[in-house]
Image: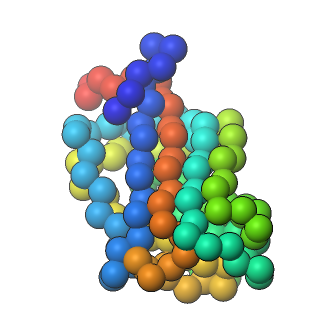
Amino acid sequence: MLRTDKMPTLLIRLKPTASGEIPLALPRQVKAQKMVLNKVMVTKSATNATETFFSIELPEIFHECVNVGSKRHCLCIPLDKDSKLEDITFSLPFGAQNLGTRLIARLYDYQGNLLTSSSHITDVFLYLSYTTDELF
């Protein structure tokens, strides 16, 4: 966790795995509070002529987002199909739930298929700021 402007910043790296489930280990719990998604960076090994977005399933943070077709709590991220690096700036607030030290994330392609380590998306970095890192 990094601190910027006296607000803690949580940097989450999502690297697709063979199973599609991405285990996350936070150094400490974070209580339920407003979080702001500031930036998403995506690296790809290749471009994809048909892909215009992908989805991130991390229900403890993005539970307010629901993909109607799949009924998953996913945040859709737009992609430039011709670029290998995406750097998207947001200022998107979420009412995050309590975050334990162990979380599971999943990534889905534009068709709703689970992304794995054989995907052309190699890394996704989420930059989230929040009010306090106090436990109580």
- Quadrant location, the C terminus: top left
Furthest residue to the top?
6
In the picture shown, does residue 70 fall above or below 5? below
Count how many numbered circles sit on residues in the image: 0
Residue 56, image x, y percentages? 54, 64
Based on the displayed image, in which of its 4 quarters is residue 91 positioned?
Answer: top right
Residue 69 at what x, y percent from top left? 67, 82
Q: Nearer the viewer, residue 38 or 121?
A: 121
Residue ID at (66%, 47%):
87
- Relative side of 91 to 63, left or right: right
Tell me if I can see residue 6 in this picture: yes
Q: Residue at x 55, y 70 (%)?
A: 45
Question: Residue 110: x and y, percent?
Answer: 67, 78
- Residue 115 drawn above or below residue 23: below
Front in this rendered view, residue 42 or 57: 42
Instruction: Check the picture and name the quadrant holding the N terminus.
Output: top left
Q: Is residue 65 visible?
A: no
**At 57% from the left edge and 66% from the top edge, which residue is drawn?**
44
Name the residue located 55 percent from the left edge and 86 percent from the top edge.
113
Residue 88 picture location, percent across and down: 69, 47
How was the colour assigned to the protein in this rendering? rainbow
Question: Residue 72 or 125: which is nearer the viewer?
Answer: 125
Q: Tell me: residue 133, above or below residue 13.
A: above
Instruction: Give the image quarter of residue 11.
Output: top left
Image-based side of 70 in relation to 96, left or right:
right
Left or right relative to 131: residue 43: right
Q: Nearer the viewer, residue 24 or 99?
A: 24
